[in-house]
Structures are given as structure tokens and as C-alpha cells.
Amino acid sequence: MNTICEADDRNPDEGYPVGRVYYNDRKEAICTAWIAPNGWLVTAGHCNSGYYKFDEIQFQVPESNCSGEVQVPEDRHRYRVDLSSIKSRVDLGATQDWALFQITPHPTFGMPGPFGEGSFFRISNRKLDRQAESVIRNTGFGVELRVFEGCKKRNRTMQSSLGKAYNSPGYLIHFLDTHMGSSGSPLYEEASNALYVMGTHRGGGCPNIATSVLNPGFLKALNDVTGRPTVYVDWMGPRTGPSNGGIEAPFRNLNKALEKVKSGGDINIVPGNYRTANLKIPNRPLRIRAPFGSVSIGQQDANSAGDN
């Protein structure tokens, strides 16, 4: 769907933890997906509904040919989707349109670059007021009909745009330029050298709509997507306000997570140096997951994070 708002201001971009969702049987680019703090990928639910299917996600996507025909990246940047992992919901009455999935490591190169680099989107718990006219960002792989230097090489490649947005009771309403194929792309802001996602684009007609990451149904599904109750730890803490251990308000301190995690539950921890005094491992079964690696845990010092 064409959801361009006035003049199209999308420009080529690179380096973000965003991939192109692809279906091999039809050799077709379908949607966009982004990487969440637990290592799962998020796209729009309708990208896996009816006619639409996908089985691959692509990074380092090259330019299309001059006529706009999509080109696939090198094999090392193509990753198979674990089809058994896909969880989705399309319920517009409940303002939900999302899908969650995992990918399988490349047999030679392992996981995609963003995983090794610790590049992902943190979940923003900041709501945008309509009167504030906040400007946020979108990055996706939408259709591009414009011609540059006589060619349509930007079609279905990574492009970003800026625009205003605000939270409604269920959706994130936005005025950022998108197009077919942008479904599933993140609406986000950059702060303190981190990426904070606020919504997952689904469509519209300007204004456009995105499933808010704070939608209760989506938030619960993402938080406990492994099937085990999960507590989250991130040295940066939440975007705003106090921590509660949820994916949108992670603890800074590992001890807090160890106190809260349920028997048989998970602790998800993102890259960083964690210093804690009197580390106490509870006498109950639990699992600590570090989907991006590079986690250091040691004794507390003067430069450690706060108690929450």
C-alpha cells in the first residue's frame, strides 16, 4: 500500500538491525523485520497471512537492477526462518498486527552481523503525546517507484525517513513515508547511542498506523516468546521511569532479576559489563540467555549501574 505523506523523503541507509523478509518459492521480497532484545525478529502479522508467506530474512541487501528487479545478497547474508517458531496475530479490533520468529544460523558464518555486533532495538516505554509533535524514524525495504539517474535501483532496498508520530490507545499513528514492503518495519528513535523502537508499521494511507510496542497483547507475546516467563536485564535500564524487569523496563542489576525470575523461567541479558555485590543464585531452576553474547559479570565497583 502506498503510504507516502506529501513529498517522499526516503533516502538510502545502512547499518541498522533491520532485514528484508523474503519468500523463495516466488522469489519475492515480502516485508521488513527488526531484531528485538531477546534475539527474536519482529514483522507485521499480515506478512504471514493468506497469500503472504516468508521463509528467509536478508541482510546487506544490494541495489536492485535498473528496471527495479530485486537482487538477492550474497549467500552469507541470507538466513532461513525457523518456520516452526513463527507466532503471529492479526486482530485489527484489538489493534494487533504482529509476527515473531527466529532464524537458523548460517552453516558457515553463524548468525547475522547484528548479533555479533550486539545491534538490536530496545523496547521504548515512552508514549508520544499528540500535541508534542515528536519526530521519529522509520527504516524499511518498501517499494520505490522513483527514478534516480535513469534507474529504479532503490526499489526494495533499505531506506529511512523521518516524520511525526503519536500514540493512540492501541496504535502508533505516524506520518512517515512508507510503501508496500515496509510492513513490519520499526518506528523508532535514537537516544544515548541506542535504538528505541515504538511501533511496527502495518499500513494506512497517511496518517499511517503501526502496532505499538506497548500494546498489551504484543508486549506479553514478545516478553515471554520462548514459552518461559522471562525477566530482562540491560545495563541501560528502561527508556524512562523505573525498572520492573519487563522487556520494556529491564533491570540494570542482575541480582534484581535473580530475585524475580520464577522457577523454570529465563533471564535475558544484553551485552554490557555488569557489576553486582553479593551475587546470589537462587536455589531453583532457571536459564540465563545472552542472545548477542559479550556479557561480563563481576564484582560491583564505583562505576557500576544503580540498584534497579
Image: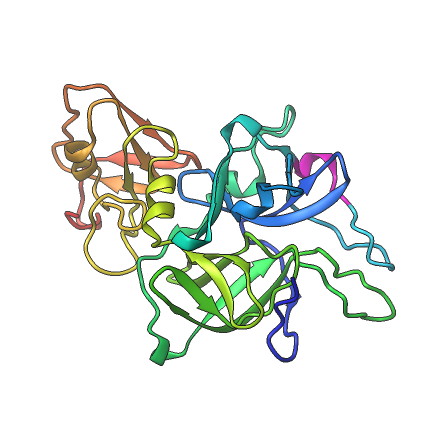
Number of dots carrying numbers: 0
- Residue 59: percent from left, percent from top: 64, 45
Identify the coloring. Answer: rainbow
- Residue 112: percent from left, percent from top: 58, 38
- Residue 39: percent from left, percent from top: 45, 38
Residue 213, magenta (yes or no): no
Which residue is nearer to you in this view: 120 or 275? 120
The residue drawn where x is 85% and y is 65% is: 151
Which quarter of the rendered picture does the N terminus lie within? bottom right
Which residue is nearer to you in this view: 278 or 147? 147
Residue 125 versus residue 22 in the image, above or below? below
Q: In the rendered view, does 138 fall on the left or right side of 165? A: right
Q: In the rendered view, does 288 fall on the left or right side of 162? A: left
The residue drawn where x is 52% and y is 45% is: 45
- Residue 71: percent from left, percent from top: 79, 47
Q: Residue furthest front?
A: 93
Residue 75, magenta (yes or no): yes
Which residue is nearer to you in this view: 73 or 57? 57
Residue 206 versus residue 30 in the image, above or below? below
Q: Residue furthest left?
A: 278
Q: In the rendered view, does 216 fall on the left or right side of 152? A: left
Residue 289 versus residue 193 in the image, above or below? above
Tell me if I can see residue 95 in this picture. no
Q: In the rendered view, does 285 fall on the left or right side of 224? A: left
Q: Quadrant of residue 183?
A: bottom right
Which residue is nearer to you in this view: 83 or 14? 83
Give, as a single range, the part of the protein colored magenta: 72-78
Residue 7 versus residue 125 in the image, above or below? below
Tell me if I can see residue 136 in this picture. yes
